[in-house]
Amino acid sequence: MRLRPVAAAIAVALTFWGVLQEPAYAADGVVARPVMGCLTEADISEFYQEAAGDEQHMMALVNSRRCVPIQHLPYSLVQSGYPFILIRVFVGDDSIKLWTLQSVLAQ
């Protein structure tokens, strides 16, 4: 009967020493809508407000790698706001903070 507490103690020790790993991230959700994520709030504002309807302007932001499509990627909320929010987007073992539309949360 003492095996359970011992097994739990071993698991805690192994986790502490880095042998057992927790998941690399805890996602709040997956981006289900076809939206963009941008490096700065100014970039996301420019993409959706100033460049809207101007395909060349939008493509310039994408080609400069300041904005990228983030649909189907797991994310966690970093900072809420309106109309833009800051999220951490996860790709494999890496992550990046990007600004996107607040409507991502209303999935």
Image (tube, rainbow, N blue to C red):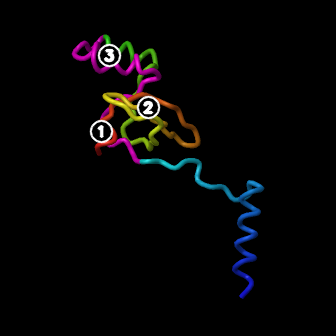
First in residue order: circle 1 vs circle 3: 1
SS at badge 3: helix
Outermost residue on the left side: it is: 53
- Left or right: where 102 falls relative to 75: left
The structure residue drawn at horizontal position 70% and vertical position 72%, both measured from the top left corner, is: 8
Mark 3, Cα crowd under 10 Å, few <14 / some 14-19 / many 20+, is some
Foreground mark, 1 or 2, reads 2
Q: What residue type is labelled 3?
A: Met
First in residue order: circle 3 vs circle 2: 3
Numbered label attached to residue 33:
1
Q: In which quarter of the image is residue 62?
A: top left
Q: Where is residue 88 in the image (x, y as percent from the top left)?
A: 49, 36
Q: Distance between the residues labelled 3 and 2?
A: 20 Å
Q: Quadrant of the C terminus?
A: top left
Numbered label attached to residue 58:
3
Q: Distance between the residues labelled 1 and 2?
A: 16 Å
Residues rendered magenta in the picture: 29-56
The structure residue drawn at horizontal position 42% and vertical position 16%, both measured from the top left corner, is: 63
The answer to whether mark 1 and mark 3 are in CB contact below 8 A is no
Against 91, residue 54 (above or below) is above
The structure residue drawn at horizontal position 27% and vertical position 15%, both measured from the top left corner, is: 55
